[in-house]
Image: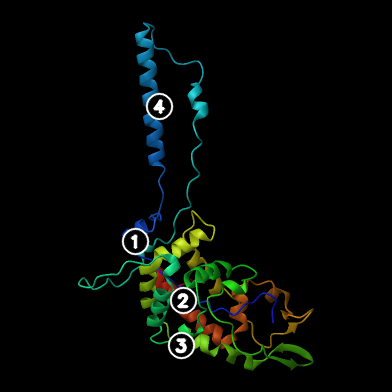
Amino acid sequence: MPTNAPEAEPKFTLDAPPDAARVAAGLRTPTPTRSGRPLIAALVVLALVAAAVAFYYLWRRGSPPAPPAAPAPAAVTTAPPAPPQPAILNPIEKIPVVPPDPGAALASLPALDGSDTLARDAISTTVNGDDLVQLLAPGSLIRHIVATVDNLPRKTIATRIRPVKPVPGAFATADVAGKMAIADRNALRYAAYVSAADAIDAKRLVGFYVRLDPLFQQAYVELGYPNGYFNDRLIVVIDHLLAAPEPKPPLFLAQPKVLYEFADPDLEQLSAGQKIMVRVGLENEARLKAKLAAIRKALTAQPVKP
């Protein structure tokens, strides 16, 4: 088994609600672009006030106003401007979703610590059953999803943060021309996960994602990204998974110690997320990519670029 290829399903789309919910959750409301005009206006106002004070002081002394020989000492104590926040590339507000029934009242979102029941219900609804729910790990579901999404493009994913239970059964290998390779039957271990992914209604899932966005955004901020925007990170990760290679079998392995590694160094250097895509087998990888592409299109209203 590759050293750092956990078996979490990459179908991690989540939530995003209206502006009012973001404000209530204490999160900043995203805008597609950021302007420097407020800062410029503030500097202009400060300059005018400073000039007016200087003119008044000099006039009261009977001295003609003259330009100062040096910058005012107060300027030394002026705090440096805050660094600009990163631009938001994919604002939640632009995701096309079916508006809720005007006669239906939307319940307020729970606190992040009490959101497991809501998250499980939302996932169960998107797959029209309990198949995927049975695979979910208990507790802190949204936090685990956010942490896993963030770590998929990295080299490893800690087992404790995975939002799904481990894949059952032993990793299957086979002897191919005297070399160890991933057995064809190993793809069967992922059948339940891939079938659950196939059952996801992409548009419905994205609708829940928009509704629950403040919880996912809060979890992302808590992860250590105070100026981060989870929806942008999510789309980056989906694109990363879609770019996973599709090597034809056999995929040869090495076992320098206890754990398996890909014998091909190009495969072994892949991220944890792309290793998952490769390990599930060509057919499963194609099915997962098709669903990821549908989810990305629903998130952005744009098809995946070839």
Marks 1 and 2: which is nearer the front? 1
Res. 21 mark: 1
Which residue appears at 79% of the width and 92% of the height?
178
For disc 4, the marked residue is 47
- Give me the C-alpha separation between circle 1 and circle 2: 28 Å
- Give me the C-alpha separation between circle 2 and circle 3: 22 Å
Q: Residues within 10 Å of mark 1 (few under 14, many from 20)?
A: some
For disc 2, the marked residue is 293
Which residue appears at 72% of the width and 85% of the height?
252
- Give me the C-alpha separation between circle 3 and circle 1: 30 Å
Q: Residues within 10 Å of mark 3 (few under 14, many from 20)?
A: some
Q: What residue type is labelled 2?
A: Ala
Q: Is residue 76 above or below residue 161?
A: above
Q: What residue type is labelled 1?
A: Ala
Q: In this view, does 268 lie above or below 284?
A: above
For disc 3, the marked residue is 131
Q: Are marks 4 and 2 in contact (CB under 8 Å)?
A: no
